[in-house]
Image: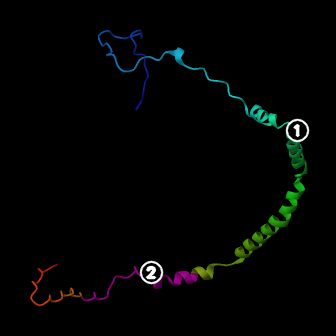
């Protein structure tokens, strides 16, 4: 499905007077009614405007930021990685190599040998059907009461 927007006003080129348009509820939009969008401030000016009222506190925040940035050396990250991640990687490599050394042929052979014992759909059902159990009877009504019809 495709949509097409065409100019259907009376001044449009190619408008045929043999097929006039009926007046409808919509009218052309007046372009002078549009409001021009206001320019938006960028993030740095918004942050600067937010820090402006802080005065001397702005310098304290700037000092704290600089201190954090300068003292977050990568040596701490490297030390933590060597302490926690490297042993885990070595343990994983050891486990992987131990798993690689296992020969699963005896396990797969035992599993294949159990195929006939665990798959019950290989042979047709050859047991006798259980006997049908009769429907339980209705209790006798009290003496003198009418007996309910059969099936209730």
Q: Nearer the viewer, mark 2 or mark 1?
A: 1
Q: What's the magenta region?
A: 109-131
Query: Which residue appears at 12% of the width and 81% of the height?
Result: 148
Tell me which corner region of the image, top left, top right, bottom left or bottom right, holds residue 55: top right
Quadrant in the picture for the N terminus: top left
Residue behind mark 2: 119
Q: Is residue 31 above or below residue 44?
A: above
Q: Secondary structure at mark 2?
A: loop
User: Which picture quadrant has residue 66?
Assistant: top right
SS at badge 1: helix
Mark 2 and mark 1: span between their CA atoms? Answer: 81 Å
On the image, numbered disc 1 is attached to which residue?
56
Which label number is shown at residue 112?
none
Measured as percent of width and height from the top left, residue 20 is found at 31, 12
Percent position of residue 9, x then y: 40, 13
Q: 60 or 6, which is in the foreground?
A: 60
On the image, which quarter does residue 79 sit in? bottom right
């Amino acid at each position: 499905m495709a949509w097409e927007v065409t100019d259907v006003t009376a001044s449009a080129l190619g408008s045929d007077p043999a097929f006039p348009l009926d007046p409808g509820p919509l009218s052309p939009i007046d372009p002078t009614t549009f409001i021009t969008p206001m320019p938006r401030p960028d993030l740095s000016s918004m942050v600067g405007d937010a820090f402006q009222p802080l005065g001397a506190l702005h310098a304290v925040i700037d000092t704290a930021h600089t201190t954090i940035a300068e003292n977050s050396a990568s040596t701490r990250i490297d030390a933590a990685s060597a302490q926690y991640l490297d042993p885990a990687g070595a343990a994983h490599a050891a486990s992987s190599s131990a798993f690689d050394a296992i020969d699963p042929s005896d396990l797969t052979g035992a599993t294949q040998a159990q195929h006939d014992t665990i798959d019950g759909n290989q042979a047709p059902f050859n047991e006798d059907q259980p006997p049908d159990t009769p429907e339980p009877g209705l209790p006798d009504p009290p003496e003198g009461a009418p007996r309910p019809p059969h099936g209730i």
